[in-house]
Amino acid sequence: MVFNPNFMNKTKFISAFLFMVFLGFAAQAQIPKVPNAGASALSTQVLGILDNTSGLNLSGDQSTKLKTNNKSFVDQLMKITGGSDSDDTKKSNILNLKNGRMKFLNELLGNELTQKYMGNVLKAINPLKSKLGLAALAF
């Protein structure tokens, strides 16, 4: 048998190409998705963080209104992120939701308490940001 260098080069090229295609599909298959079952646990965690008002000295009325708004906010946020809209539409909807929430907080708590409250929320939410995905834009 005669050694043919062109045959070896073509074989190496084809093998390398097939290997790269395989790696591409394997990498794509590992992109994490937020499972719907985990969304319930995640929304419970987020709600727990939002409902923590320690150190703010809120009145009973303020606390009740805040907790009611927190529940609605988290429900709307999870509905947006779990929807079938494009990522751009989801981002826009999340930012609109965030703006409405900040307006509500400023009206309910005033600027100083809102800043203190949001500072506490951001500290507690940071470890969850990777799990939240697009929903992290709301904080």
Image (tube, rainbow, N blue to C red):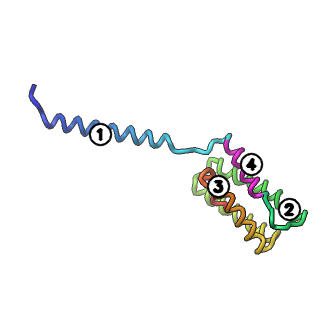
Q: How far apart are marks 3 and 2 (CA)?
A: 24 Å
What SS does tag 4 mark?
Answer: helix
Asked if 100 appears above or below 1 in the picture, the reply is below
> Which amino acid is tagged 1?
Ala
Q: Mark 3 points at which residue?
A: 135
Q: Distance between the residues labelled 4 and 2?
A: 18 Å
Which one is closest to the eye, mark 3 or mark 4?
4
Give whichever of 85, 67 is nearer the camera: 67
Q: Residue 39, image x and y in percent?
A: 68, 45
> Which amino acid is tagged 3?
Ala
Q: Distance between the residues labelled 1 and 2?
A: 62 Å
Query: Circles 4 and 2: CB distance less than 8 Å?
Result: no
Query: Circles 3 and 2: CB distance less than 8 Å?
Result: no
Near mark 4 (Cα within 10 A), the count class, few <14, some 14-19 or many ≥20, is: some
Q: Give the range drawn in magenta.
A: 38-50
Q: Mark 1 points at which residue?
A: 16
For residue 133, side relative to residue 24 (left or right): right
Instruction: Identify the mark nearer the N-term, 3 or 2.
Output: 2
Instruction: Identify the mark nearer the N-term, 1 or 2.
Output: 1
For residue 18, side relative to residue 104 (left or right): left
Q: Distance between the residues labelled 1 and 4?
A: 47 Å
Q: Name the residue under label 2.
A: 63
Instruction: Identify the mark nearer the N-term, 4 or 2.
Output: 4
- Residue extending farthest to the right is 60
Near mark 1 (Cα within 10 A), the count class, few <14, some 14-19 or many ≥20, is: few
The residue positioned 62% from the left and 55% from the top of the image is 129
Q: Name the residue under label 4.
A: 44
Picture quadrant where residue 15 is located: top left
Near mark 2 (Cα within 10 A), the count class, few <14, some 14-19 or many ≥20, is: some
Is 71 magenta? The answer is no
User: What secondary structure predominates along the stretch shown in magenta?
Assistant: helix
